[in-house]
Amino acid sequence: MHTKMPVHKIILFLSPIGILLSIFLSVRSGSTYISTGQIVEAVVLFDPENITHAVIMTSRIPRAVGSMVIGALLAMSGAIMQGMTRNYLASPSIMGVSDGAAFVITLSLIFLPSMTSLEKMILSLVGSSLGVGIVLGLASLVRNGLSPVRLAIIGTIIGTFFSSLSAALASYFQISQTMSFWYNARLHQINPDLLVFSIPFAAVGVLLALALSNSITILSFGDEVSISLGQRRGLVKILAMLAVVMMTGISVALVGKIGFVGLMIPHISRFLVGIDYKWVIPCSGIIGGIFLTLCDVISIYVNYPFETPIGVVTSIIGVPFFLYLIKTRGGANYR
C-alpha cells in the first residue's frame, strides 16, 4: 500500500533543486548574454581580469543570492506576524516594519553619512522596531484596532507617514537620489560585501524563527488555547517580534523596501502545508526566496533592456491578492 508523501516534505525535498534553478536563471538573465559554461568557469576558475567573470561574481551571483535570501526573510517574517497576531493581513510592508527601517536609514544618511555596514544594519533594525512598535501601540489604543482591516489601515497610515517624512527630509537635505534606492528597491545595486556581512545576522533571525515555530502555532489558535497550555505568551511575542525585526531590518538594509512578499507567501504556504507553523515558516522561506528571485528575473525582461524596479513586479501580483483577501475574508480574524 502506497502512502502519499506530505506536501511539506515534497517542498523541503525539492527545495535545493528549485533554489539552484532559480539562482541559475537569475545569473543567466541580463542585458549581456552569459553562457552556462562561462558561469561554471567563473565559479570554478575565477579570473579577476576577465570582465565576464567579474560581472558574474561581483554582480549577478550576489544579486541572485540576495534576492533568494531577502525573499526568504520577508516571507518568514510575514508568516510569524500572521501567526502571532492571528491577522491574515499582517506583513512587514503593511505593519510599518519596512517603512520604519527606511526612515531611520534616511536619518542616518543625513546625520551619519560615513556610517559603517554594521552601523547601517543596526540602525535598520532599530527602525524596524520603531515602525512595528508604533503600529501595534496605536492599534492597541483603538477599539478593535488589532482586527485585520483596522490594523492594516493603521499600518498603512503609519507607513505612509514615515515614507512621506523620509521623502521630505531627503529632498531638503538633497539626498533624494540616494534614498531612491531604499524606496525603489533595485537588486542589481546590492552591495556584495554587505550581503556577506549580513548572512550571520540573517541566520540568527531564521534560527530564532524556526525555534519559535511550535509556539507560533499555539499562539495562532488564540489566547484561550495558549493560556490553557501554560504558554508564556509575552516572552514568545517579544522573541517573535525580535526575529521579525532582525529579518526585515536586514532585508531593508540590503536593498530597501519590497512589498507584498510577506503578505502573499505565508498564505500560499498554509494552503499547501496546513496550519502547523513548524512547516509553514520554513516552507514560506523556501517559496518566498524562489518567488522573489523569479520576480527579479521578470523585472529584467518586462521592459527590456531597461530594468523595472522589483517592487513594481511584486505589487502587480500582490495588490490583487490583497484585495482578494479583503473580499473573501472581510474583517474576520485569522481563524
Image (cartoon, rainbow, N blue to C red):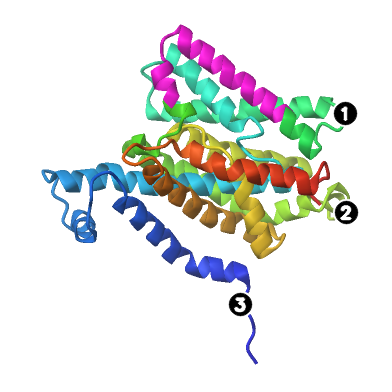
Q: How crowded is mark 2: few (under 14 residues within 10 Å), some or many (20 or more)?
A: few
Q: Tell me if 61 is positioned left or right of 198 in this view.
A: left
Tag in front: 3 or 2: 3
Q: Which label sits on residue 23? A: none
Secondary element type, mark 2: helix
For the residues marked 3 and 2, what is the alpha-carbon distance in whole angstroms?
33 Å
| Residue 332 image position (x, y, % from top left) | 83, 45
Q: Which residue lies furthest to the top in this view?
A: 172
Give the residue type at disc 2.
Ser
Secondary element type, mark 1: loop
The answer to if 176 sits in the magenta stretch is yes
**Residue behind mark 3:** 5
The main secondary structure of the magenta stretch is: helix
For the residues marked 3 and 1, what is the alpha-carbon distance in whole angstroms?
45 Å
Question: Quick one: label 3 or label 2, which is nearer the N terminus?
Answer: 3
Give the residue type at disc 3.
Met
Q: Nearer the viewer, residue 116 or 8?
A: 8
**Residue behind mark 2:** 228
Q: Nearer the viewer, residue 182 or 230?
A: 182
Q: Which residue lies furthest to the front in this view?
A: 303
| Residue 334 image position (x, y, % from top left) | 78, 48
The answer to if 144 sits in the magenta stretch is no
Q: Which label sits on residue 143? A: 1
Magenta span covers which residues?
A: 154-180
> Are circles 2 and 1 on residues that touch, CB within 8 Å?
no
Q: Nearer the viewer, residue 307 or 181?
A: 307
Q: Tell me if 166 is positioned left or right of 298 in this view.
A: right
Q: How crowded is mark 1: few (under 14 residues within 10 Å), some or many (20 or more)?
A: few
Image quadrant where residue 188 sits: top left
